[in-house]
Image (tube, helix red, strand yellow):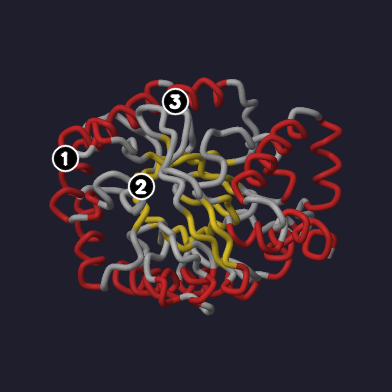
């Protein structure tokens, strides 16, 4: 109530990227002090029955995670457990620091419960993120790390793109940083586009990734705008390369899926988060689970804005779910609400 009635109207008066940067800064500061963590936890943390899950040998206190794309530099690991999350996916991180795309990088579409996201993989680079996470005191909070190729013209070629992924993946494993890794092949807002969502190139990328010693789960973050036949070809390649599972999925590129198309500004660029992803991602989760059974771990992501939408993901076959936009529109209390009411 406080967030939706008071705080959100104030936040929504300002540029969304400014608000995002403020929230990351505030969360990082509050998370450094036990009194700050306690106050947030007193209000927002989940304290109900045990809903923990063990997935690929990793125990999640709750099955709700922060998706990649919010804490892309790994600054919030101390505070996020206090709002009931069982883990987060940091990143996407890239081999080199990246300034991202030109502004505006975020545009709210409140009637459609969505955000146009055009970040362009803004992050400080994998080595800076490794140094920061090394200082994090390990708890029962799960840290996944999403890996993408650097958004610059140097990594556009297939060979350089693969080398870019491999460098980040190798460095994270060398330093033993992160509990699991996600290979992000589906960011639409970068030089060269979603090149590794091509079946042949995905096979080459995963083959190179598998050459790096790794004893942690590996997932692939999937595009959601592919027809099922092409989506399934990617799943087959992921299966043959022994990858543990998939994150379904990334942003929606189809603006016709918006409830209010007229909200979109005259000039825009980026993918859609939030509600426009809900139906597509849930359908792909169900089809994947129906066809592959328990072969894949499935992390459901896209349009988790309520208890109902979270339940849909679990009913479709998701083992865990991730969210960002639901937190922005509904506030941190949505996590506890989902945890208290969802049937897993």
Q: Earlier in the sequence, mark 2 or mark 1?
A: 1
Is residue 39 at all visible to an observer of this figure?
Answer: yes
The residue where tag 1 is placed is 158
- Image quarter hosting the N terminus: bottom right
Tell me the distance, in whole angstroms, between the alpha carbons under discs 2 and 1. Answer: 15 Å
Horizontal and vertical percent position of residue 226: 28, 68
- Tell me the tag on residue 344: none
Secondary structure, mark 2, is: strand
Q: For the image shown, how many numbered marks are present on the structure?
A: 3
Task: Name the residue that disc number 3 marks.
Answer: 176
Q: Secondary structure at mark 1?
A: helix
Crowd class of label 3 (few under 14; some 14 to 19; many from 20; radius 10 Å): some
Question: Left or right of 35: which side holds 255?
Answer: left
Any part of residue 180 in sight: no
Q: Is residue 297 left or right of residue 142?
A: left
Q: Which mark is residue 184?
A: 2
Asked which quadrant contains residue 133, the reply is top right
Q: Quadrant of the C terminus?
A: bottom right
Q: Secondary structure at mark 3?
A: loop
Q: Residue at x 53, y 53 (%)?
A: 106
What residue is shown at x 73% (from left), y 37% (from top)? 26
Name the residue: 57% across, 54% down: 53
Contact between labelled residues 1 and 3, with CB atoms less than 8 Å apart:
no
Per the model, the C-alpha gap separating discs 3 and 2 is: 19 Å
Q: Is residue 101 found left or right of 225 in the rendered image?
A: right
Of labels 3 and 2, the one closer to you:
2
Marks 2 and 1 close (CB-CB < 8 Å): no
Query: Residue drawn 59% across and 48% down?
Result: 60
Above or below residue 289? Residue 158 is above
Counting residues from the start of the chain, the first of labels 3 and 2 encountered is 3
């Amino acid at each position: 109530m406080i967030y939706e009635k008071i705080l959100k109207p104030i936040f929504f008066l300002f540029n969304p990227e400014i608000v995002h940067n403020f929230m990351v800064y505030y969360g990082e500061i509050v998370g450094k002090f036990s009194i700050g963590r306690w106050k947030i936890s007193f209000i927002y943390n989940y304290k109900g029955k045990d809903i923990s899950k063990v997935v690929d040998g990793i125990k999640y206190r709750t099955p709700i995670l922060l998706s990649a794309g919010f804490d892309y530099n790994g600054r919030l690991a101390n505070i996020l457990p206090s709002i009931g999350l069982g883990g987060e996916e940091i990143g996407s991180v890239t081999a080199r620091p990246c300034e991202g795309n030109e502004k505006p990088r975020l545009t709210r579409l409140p009637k459609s419960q969505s955000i146009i996201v055009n970040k362009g993989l803004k992050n400080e680079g994998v080595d800076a993120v490794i140094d920061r996470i090394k200082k994090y005191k390990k708890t029962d909070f799960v840290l996944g790390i999403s890996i993408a190729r650097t958004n610059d013209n140097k990594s556009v070629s297939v060979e350089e793109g693969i080398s870019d992924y491999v460098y980040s993946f190798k460095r994270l494993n060398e330093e033993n940083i992160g509990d699991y890794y996600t290979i992000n092949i589906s960011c639409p807002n970068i030089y060269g586009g979603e090149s590794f969502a091509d079946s042949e190139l995905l096979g080459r990328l995963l083959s190179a990734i598998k050459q790096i010693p790794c004893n942690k789960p590996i997932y692939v973050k999937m595009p959601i705008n592919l027809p099922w036949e092409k989506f399934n070809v990617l799943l087959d390649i992921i299966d043959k390369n022994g990858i543990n599972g998939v994150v379904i999925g990334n942003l929606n590129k189809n603006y016709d899926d918006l409830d209010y198309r007229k909200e979109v500004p005259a000039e825009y660029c980026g993918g859609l988060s939030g509600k426009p992803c809900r139906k597509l991602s849930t359908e792909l989760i169900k089809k994947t689970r129906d066809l592959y059974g328990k072969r894949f771990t499935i992390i459901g992501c896209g349009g988790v804005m309520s208890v109902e939408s979270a339940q849909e993901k679990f009913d479709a076959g998701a083992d865990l779910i991730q969210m960002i936009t639901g937190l922005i529109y509904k506030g941190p209390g949505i996590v506890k609400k989902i945890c208290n009411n969802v049937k897993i």
